[in-house]
Amino acid sequence: MPYFKEMPLDPSQLMLYGQSVEEAVPADCDVRAFADVMRLLDYSQIESKCSERGCPPYRPREMVKILGYAYSKGIRSSRKIEEHLNFDMRFIWLAGGLKPDHNTIARFRKSNWQELIGLIGRSARLCCEAGLVYLNVVCTDGSKVRAAGSKKQMYDEPRLEREMGAVEKMLEEAEEIDRLEDEQDAGGGDDKLPGHLKDAKVRKARLEEIAKRLDESESRYVVASEPESRVMQTGEGKRPAYNLQASVDAESQVVVAMELTQAENDYGQLPAMAEKVESETGMSVDVMVADAGYPDEKTLVWSEQTKTDVLMPVAQHWRARRRDDAFANRHFVLDEKKDVLICPAGYELTFRGEFWTGSASYRRYEGSECPSCAFSSECVTKDRKNRRISVSVVERQRRAMRAKLESEEGKRLYDLRKQTVEPVFGRIKSNLGLSRFLLYGLEGASAEAALMCMVHNVTKCMASKAAMAYIAARNARATAVGPVFTLLCAVIVRTKRILPFRWAQHRLALRRPCLAVASAF
């Protein structure tokens, strides 16, 4: 006979448990470190919204802790969070025995989305104080995250015409049946509309509303169940989605700025993200790195006017890539003083005008002595007498950007992008489960994205022994120990040597903990 282990007790047997929740949570449980970090965030903005009248609400800082810890475990459903608050000892310890129901959790998350976005900046500022972030190199990128709306709710003009035609046919058939019944006097005096006719009329009204919404939008598609989302190209094909923009510190992979947009591409997003980083952290960025989806005219002009050091690949115009000979566009030299282009043969192409192509502005130059040139057959196309070249209005900035990226330092810094922001998106979308938003609308999706980025920053603090030592000192209100721990964090971080030590910037970061600890007394 096989021998098996016996059950030590019957499920109906009475047992006595210890009453201390503190003893039930192990000393090395991650919820304790999570609570220590979350305790130092500033919740004044979100707590100021609470009213002094009526039934007292749940304390916002406790609600944020509950939501944050749940999201760190990949638990996003409000019903699942309610379940863990009743049975999971970690959640019971973190919430102090509070048990908000799923409706309260969902309403808090949806109504405080702006304040939750503000907590990202506070978590990034805490990482600066702990010595994790110095903004030597900040990489910015965007990632498409599917919206809560279903792909079955995507409508374009062909689908609207097809379904509208089917509804019209159904209504015509119903009217024909009614007419025949009236002629045969078979109506029976019943004035009620048939069920299929009611449904057809309701569907027609809904399709007309969707068609109106499609005419007002500039997109090919519209999502009926979630109008604020946009149909974007994702890994699963065209789906309703949002564009999650994130700026990440290259040394620590801390998200220092985040914004959820409805833009289908990344053009023009970099200036706003750079300003957001400075406003959130109070520190200037040394080098901003972005991929080829960001450069446009406004971004290149902004980087030159603000003297922001930006690294991003700038592709050549498709017309400039068509030829690869001695008379290609790139071999024509621009003389800015005379405002002419000098061809390889020494002739000048004069300025003829400026035009807009829908995405960029160009200056057109055209030669006048091309027929007499010995290289006319090699240079000028057959459909024109003189050579005509269109040059971008920011061509000088584009060439400077290409030269910067071709340098050894530029290549080294740009290589940091793929090991900085891409792993952050991978962790948020794969490990934490943000492959699709659960909440409808831009506000709900922004709340979820903000919680994920804040949790990511908190876990980065938890993974650093030096940062946790500083946080422990802050929680213990040790005025003398706090700055020492911060200086130790700075020394540890500087061993990576990504860029030379910038004392002016780091002094600002080291000054924060002194003021923060002193203000606690």
Image (spheres, helix red, strand yellow):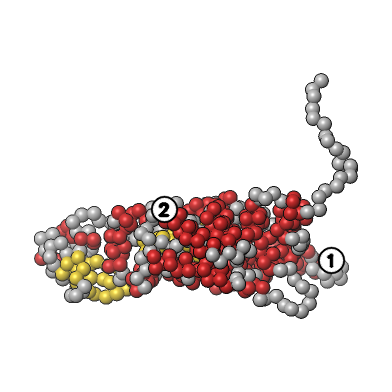
Locate the C terminus and report the quarter of the image it occupies.
bottom right
Residue 176 visible in this rendered orientation of the protein: no
Q: CA distance from mark 1 to mark 2?
A: 92 Å
Judge the density around disc 1: few (<14), some (14-19), many (≥20) Cα neighbours within 10 Å.
Answer: few
Q: Residue furthest bottom?
A: 53
- Amino acid type indicated by mark 2: Thr
> Dividing the picture into quarters, in which one does residue 50 lie?
bottom right
Q: Which residue occupies 43% across, 52% down?
A: 418
Front-lying residue, 297 or 424: 424
Residue 336 visible in this rendered orientation of the protein: yes
Front-lying residue, 470 or 330: 470
Residue 306 percent across, percent down from the top left: 36, 73
Q: Is residue 31 above or below residue 349?
A: above
Q: Which residue occupies 65% across, 49% down?
A: 28
Specify whether 188 is left or right of 142: right
- Amino acid type indicated by mark 1: Ala
Residue 507 percent across, percent down from the top left: 43, 67
Residue bearing the label numbered 2: 495
Closer to the camera: disc 1 or disc 2? 2
Q: Residue furthest top?
A: 1
* Tag 1 secondary structure: loop
Residue 245 percent across, percent down from the top left: 50, 63
Q: Which residue occupies 23% across, 61% down?
A: 330
Residue bearing the label numbered 1: 186
